[in-house]
Image (cartoon, coloured by chain):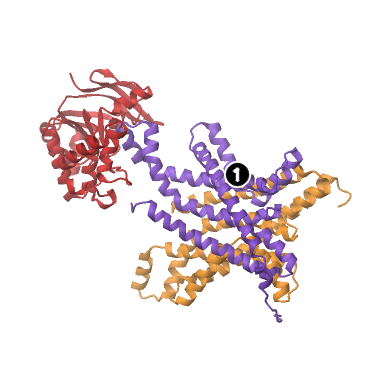
Amino acid sequence: MPILRTENVNKHFDKLHVLKNISFSVEQAETLVILGPSGSGKSTLLRCLNQLERVDSGTIYFEERPLSYERKAIYRNRRNFGMIFQSFNLFPQKTALENVTLGPMTVARVSRAEAEREARVLLEKVKLTDKAHAYPAKLSGGQQQRVAIARALAMRPKVLLFDEPTSALDPETIGDVLEVMRRLAQERTTMIVVTHELGFAREIAERIIFMDIGEIIEEGPSQELLTRPKSARLTAFLDAVLHK
Amino acid sequence: MESQPVVVQYAYFFLKATGITLVLSALSLLTGSAIGFLFSLLRISENRALSTLTLVYAEVFRGSPLLVQLFLVYFGLPIVFHLDVSAFTTVAVSMILYTAGYMTEIFRAAIQAVDRGQWDASYSIGMTYTQALCKVVIPQAMRIAVPPTLGQFISILKDSSLASIIGFMELTKAGMAVRARTSNTLFAFAIVTCLYFMICYSLSIASRRVELRLKKT
Amino acid sequence: MTGRYTFDFSAILRYWPELVQGVWIAASLSVLTFLLGTAFGIFGAIGRISRRRWIYGISTFYVELFRNTPLLVQLYIAYYGLETLSIKLNAFTAALLAMSLNSGAYETEIIRGGIIAVGKGQIEAAFSLGMTYTQTLRKVVIPYALQVIFPPLGNQFIGIILGSSVASVITVPEITYVGLNIGSRSYRDFETFLVIWVIYIALNVVLSALFKLCGRIAFRPIL
């Protein structure tokens, strides 16, 4: 049973048809990459999963139960997911530690002592123990993104959603984030990663879905998809990147 | 005029007062801007004395109530300088001094908001400070200064109402006069409020459009 | 023609108890105005970011009305205008009403600016963690917004104190009113108002410095 499944999902932004009959599924412990050029709708699709955006038609199933749009149900659904953003979105007035503990303390009503203990474990996991009391302004992009990962993990989500996690990072710091993600994959965390960066996709993906202009063009195991593309659009995309 | 119906007479009276308000405000803005512009150049100069003096001027005139400044001019001119001036002159002088304080700051901020790179580029091709300032920086600063200046004009329009306190016949005083004449307080205040609102609100909308237009380029 | 003019400050400095009284009245009027104005401002800001058209409409009307008409006219309406509707307010109350509604309009925009400054990103991050609307508001939006609005609110307060001078016109016994009083009794209007001028400037300088200091202490160096 796939942990997450969408069925004919459609979404419009005003007149623009951003998602066209999207149907796909994700298995537990899988690392799925949704690859595609800018404007392909992949970020929108991701944001529909944790209901930051609302679908116009179609159904999203989490653990075979359809998502409800009733307010309380939305809050509960979001706790199944953890999202990591392109622009990190750390809370600027809180230290790294406080960023990680805020969720558990506020939403899960965990005690401060417990939350802090957990937080330190997570910060160690992302190799930022010594930055626990630093403010986001004093951290590099890669460090901020790793704190963001720790923050998402603190809520013990079942699926991690990455929205262009490395697009705002220097090439050097991408490696640190990549390492954390590899570890998470090893630990059998279910991850859906949206990116337009081919190199990054290649490193992390088990399975790839290629999207363009709101449609799923191709999907398959990453090795196969990238070396033997079947569709013209994917071929063009790969060519364009290789010739940069 | 006396033969016209009452409504028309009052309409004419209010319109005339509105015109006076506009003229007074425009005069204050133009003169105050001229002074403020000069002061802003002194403010950014390397001469410590001039810079500090203009800083103090701006802080003093922005940091004290216009009404108090108005009274100072009102009582001061005849007493200290032995000048017998009309209410209009008193009000104009006071508002010009007050506005100059604000305009100094507005122009200073606009000049300093121009990208440092513009100075570098100008110097690189051999311009002097004055040439860079006049040919490159100030033209750009003027564009930046437009929205806050418009905002200041709207403020001046409202502040001009204080002139009524020393008996100058502008819009607010016109309202008080009509109130006394007709004993219809609400009518008078309603007209005055509407007139101020229409003028200031339209200018406010226009200012926002101008700001958007300037941001685009 | 500047002839000789002998300045005589002793005439007004004799009246210093009355000046102190005036400062006290101005201060209490200003503080109350600020508090009420902030209350109006919070409601106004909520209204101005509301998606319901009529709530947005009323709050926008309030803000535009009070920001596009002079405070003096608002004071007159509160004191003389309401009287014709059989609502007789004493000078202080009328001034408080007019000034707080006026200040509230400006504070609405300040507070709204603070809320907007928080930015979608942080709010989405909070939602993604599963936080409810209320929790996000309390734990993420408000702390950050408070820091953003602190300097402009401080300036607003100083603006209220300077603006309180206009209340003298409807006979509120604050600093300027006392000054007019003393001036007419001592025939030394000019010296009186020089002193009054200095008092306001001093208030401005001291309060500005105080607010800057408070801001530095209360808010950790985030930027």
Is residue A166 in sight in this rendering? no
Place of residue C198 in the rendered image (x, y in percent of width and height, measured from the top left): 59, 67
Q: Amino acid at mark 1?
A: Leu
Q: Is residue C151 left or right of residue A113?
A: right
Which residue does the numbered mark 1 point to in the structure image?
C101
In the displayed structure, would residue C34 be above or below residue C162? above
Which of the pair A51/A118 is nearer the observer?
A: A118
Q: Quadrant of residue B31?
A: bottom right
Q: Quadrant of residue B120?
A: bottom left
Q: Quadrant of residue A47?
A: top left
Place of residue A113 in the rendered image (x, y in percent of width and height, measured from the top left): 24, 37
Which chain does tag 1 point to? Answer: C
Chain letter, colour red: A
Q: Mark 1: few, some, or many residues within 10 Å (few <14, many ≥20)? A: many
Q: Is residue A60 left or right of residue A240?
A: right
In the displayed structure, would residue B17 be above or below residue B7? below
In the displayed structure, would residue A76 be above or below residue B54? above
Place of residue C143 in the rendered image (x, y in percent of width and height, measured from the top left): 39, 43
Which of the pair B119/C164 is nearer the observer?
A: C164
Q: Quadrant of the C terminus of chain B?
A: bottom left
- Write the residue at 50% across / 59% down: C207
- Write the residue at 47% across / 73% down: B51
Q: Is residue C61 left or right of residue A217?
A: right
Which of the pair C45/A165 is nearer the observer?
A: C45
Q: Looking at the image, which residue sits at the far bottom?
A: C4
Place of residue C19 in the rendered image (x, y in percent of width and height, measured from the top left): 64, 61
Chain C colour in the picture: purple
Chain letter, colour orange: B
> Which secondary structure, mark 1?
helix
